[in-house]
Image: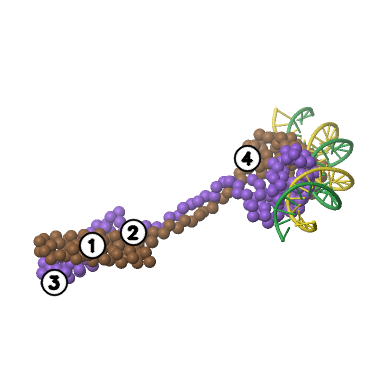
Chain colours: A purple, B brown, C yellow, D green
Amino acid sequence: MRRLLLYGGLGGVLLALLQLVEYQHFVRAYPGEVYGGLLAVLFTAVGIALGLRWTRPREVVRVREVPVPAEPFALDREALRRLAITPREHEILGLIAEGLSNREIGQRLFVSENTVKTHASRLFAKLGARRRVEAVRRARELRLVP
Amino acid sequence: MRRLLLYGGLGGVLLALLQLVEYQHFVRAYPGEVYGGLLAVLFTAVGIALGLRWTRPREVVRVREVPVPAEPFALDREALRRLAITPREHEILGLIAEGLSNREIGQRLFVSENTVKTHASRLFAKLGARRRVEAVRRARELRLVP
DNA sequence: GGCGGAATCACCCGAAAGGATGACGACGGG
DNA sequence: CCCGTCGTCATCCTTTCGGGTGATTCCGCC
């Protein structure tokens, strides 16, 4: 509504300006070149002003809300490297987090239970954990497992 | 650099347009009013175009990322009731999920380790789990613990 | 060719966890 | 008042964990 009034008023002023500038004796008093040049400069300025006014609303800052997705789980390889956790250890960490026993893990990976225990021990040392649940907890915090 | 060339070229075109339009016989052929009106409209358009071009860089889109709270954790009391998990058991479940041993839980709750083991056993039965990590896993899925 | 990391396996030992069962007191609803 | 639930504790036994140590094999790298 306010914008409409603004544009209406602007149009009126423009017409008035046109009438004024175009007045007959003014036309005859000066050479056509000067007259045309003046007109050109004047209305170029008017046009620029109009353009500025019209484009002003475009300065509006668009705020786009980007919600963080629920839980895509991005593995933190950097943390893995920092803690010097080997691929095999990481694999076993995942199975521990699944709730499997050392024996079950060994059967699934076709290695002995003793091997799994060795990996697990080193894992706990690297994670600073003394119990399985603790290890899983830390691993989750460090984004090593989902 | 590219912008400079653009503006230079634009200025040249403007001057050429001015010369063309202002040609003498054209001026005499039409009444001054029409001539002025044409000029006005033309250069208003030019001005608007210029204004648009100049103000285009101002329509900057600022993207502000608003992080959404990941997971508020709403306890599923319905699941608790369905599985007939008592308040005490739920409390101990929480401590197990924290990674505490039965002894530590007993000390924290001022009860014997045996009591904790009893609660834990019943808990595992109700959760259908045979190991701590498994129990914690299920409890998390069921929204019984964070 | 030696060196170090990674993966594998073994043995021992103590601690922790888990299963089964029984028991006892408190408390509340029928 | 009796019965069921809850919380507590115990005892016995088996399984699983976790720590420690040592050894072997393979592979890549200097």
The circle drawn on residue A2 is none
| Chain letter of the residue carrying label 1 | B
> In x, y percent, where is residue B64?
48, 56
* In front: label 4 or label 2: 2
> In x, y percent, where is residue A74?
60, 49
In screen coordinates, is A105 left or right of B43?
right
| Chain letter of the residue carrying label 3 | A
Residue holding disc 3: A30
Q: Are the residues at dot 3 and dot 2 in contact (C-beta closer than 8 Å)?
A: no
Residue holding disc 4: B76
Q: Are marks 1 and 3 on the same chain?
A: no
User: Circle 2 — which element?
Assistant: helix
Type of the residue with mark 3: Tyr
> In x, y percent, where is residue A2?
30, 56
In screen coordinates, is A126 left or right of B69?
right
> In x, y percent, where is residue B120?
76, 40
Residues C9 and A6: in front is C9
In screen coordinates, is D11 left or right of B99?
right
Identify whether B67 is placed above or below A108. below
Crowdedness of circle 1 by 10 Å Cα count: few (<14), some, many (20+)? many
Q: Give the Cα distance between marks 1 and 3.
A: 20 Å
The circle drawn on residue A55 is 2
Residues B39 and D8: in front is B39
* In front: label 1 or label 4: 1
Residue holding disc 1: B43
- Residue at 29 percent across and 60 percent down: it is B49
Q: Give the Cα distance between marks 2 and 1.
A: 18 Å
Q: Are marks 4 and 3 on the same chain?
A: no
